[in-house]
Amino acid sequence: MEQSRLETMMKAMWIILYLDTLLWFSTTRATKRCENVITDCRADKGNWTRCYEDRIRTCTTTFGRQLGFYRHTVNSSHEAEAAPSFYYRVKVPSLALQRSIQGQPGDEVLLVAAVIDSSNFKLSRPRGRAVVSNLTILGNSVLAVMAGHSPVNNLSQPVRLFFANPEKVERGTCVFWLDSEIEPGTGRWSTAGCDTINNVTEFVCSCNHLSFFAVLVNPDLSVTKSDAVKLSYVNYVGSALSVIFTLISLIIYIHLHRRRPEKAIGLHMQLTGALFCLHLSYLLCNFWARQQKEDGWVCKMLGLFLHWSLLATFTWTALEGFHLYLLLVKVFNIYVRRYLLKLSSVGWGLPTLVASICGILGVYGKYSLPLKDANGETLPEEMCWMSSQFPHKELVIYITVVAFLCLVILCNTFMLGLVVFKLTTLREGSGGFERSGKKMSRERWTRLWKDCATVLGLSCVLGLPWALASTTYGQNHVTGIYIFTIFNALQGVFMFLWSVALTCKSRADKYSSVRDPSSQKMATTVVYSPGH
């Protein structure tokens, strides 16, 4: 009896010991599951990506192969291919596999490829430069690729990664993750050592190392619905004011040109006419697109008119800079026969030629503005411009608008700097910047104000407000969009103020003597022209 009781107690103890062992083993396995690695590593202080690289090699999966995760032993003498999901795959050359097991016996190497949610990657706070925040990650996923235990860098045979592109995103850049040594748990995306090829259906990344890879895409302009409505009102009101004030400016310039037929006034008149056409065509293109849903010939003609007006504005802006070049760099008394006629052949002829070629190619039509609200819902904004159905519209925009504008801004910025240099030289030559007394005299403040007004006026004439397009990118891109929209929608108003300033200067020169010789020289520079 006692022996049977003792045997029963022994069995019970073995059962309890077995259950405890099983419970401990199950708990240990749970903490080492592959699906828990990211959570565990992010809970630790420091760079979680390094923790992930160490633990992902020894973790276990519950149900064999897991979706979005690939881990197998491969032969290092052959190229290995891993496809953790239908949208992501990678081809690792044998050179990378062999380098990952340097110093270890055998040809077998562990290859890991995992798809990770991009929300786990936090960008470092900007230090010295802004973080590009309007870039998003294709598919909101990152592909992590690791092999062996040794770091793999500077490969002569690149690792090729394939990212499916079901939404046919046109622009994307292959990047990899760099941890921040200053702010643990954060980092930034880098393109070093990676090349990008877009095959329409997928992005192919060729990188010379193993790491966490992704494709950064520049999505459609993302603004809230309220911001889109406000920007539309700013555009419409600003363009309407510009149409009115450019028309008034034309009348002023015609009157000035009759009294003082300088060629510079003729140039201002041509540029003002181009701005009038630009803002008028913008209003007409938006109005017609809202009234007519079909993409008819009227919308195509309005799109051509808008493109022609925009090119004419850029061209005449460039000619304003060219005019300053002749005055300030060449000689003041240079003579060019039929100067204004030759400039007009370029200012109106070049836009006509480009717009005609685009019209023959069928570029123009109804364009859907790529505006989205915060929830990703597309806003129904359309205008007559370049047709969204034209297959190469982006290339046409880059060549005829973006590249041309960048070239004009670059040249005219140089010319504006030359004007500031000439102003400084004239002031120093006339003793305008010499210090006399404890405070700057009233005359010096007046001259400084006039010089600043001259520079600001010339900035508008030279089209430098278009350079504000660079503020629409970066961390505060919405604020930049507002600034760019306001300044460029009111270009006609700025030209009106410039015409009024020239009128006041003309009257002052007529009815009063010039006390400041440097001001007289700069005024002559602004309005004088070759061939007069």
Image (cartoon, rainbow, N blue to C red):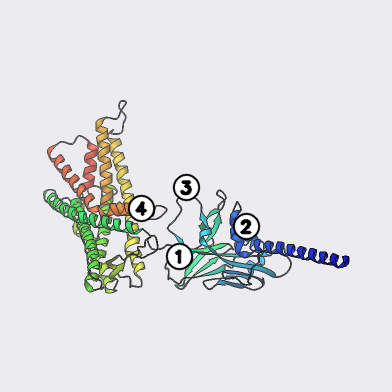
Q: Earlier in the sequence, mark 3 or mark 4?
A: 3
Q: Are marks 1 and 4 in contact (CB under 8 Å)?
A: no
Which tag is nearer the camera, tag 3 or tag 4?
A: 4
Label 1 sits on what residue type?
Gly
Quadrant housing residue 55: bottom right
Of residues 426 and 230, which is closer to you in this image?
A: 230
- The Cα–Cα distance between marks 4 and 2, rounded to whole angstroms, is 39 Å
Residue that mark 3 sits on: 128
In-image side of 162 versus 283 (left or right): right
- The Cα–Cα distance between marks 3 and 4, rounded to whole angstroms, is 19 Å
- The Cα–Cα distance between marks 1 and 3, rounded to whole angstroms, is 25 Å
Q: How many marks?
A: 4
Q: Are marks 2 and 3 in contact (CB under 8 Å)?
A: no
Q: Circle 1 — which element?
A: strand
Rendered position, 240 above or below 112: above
Residue 101 percent location from the top left of the image: 68, 65
Residue 172's tag is 1
Residue that mark 4 sits on: 480
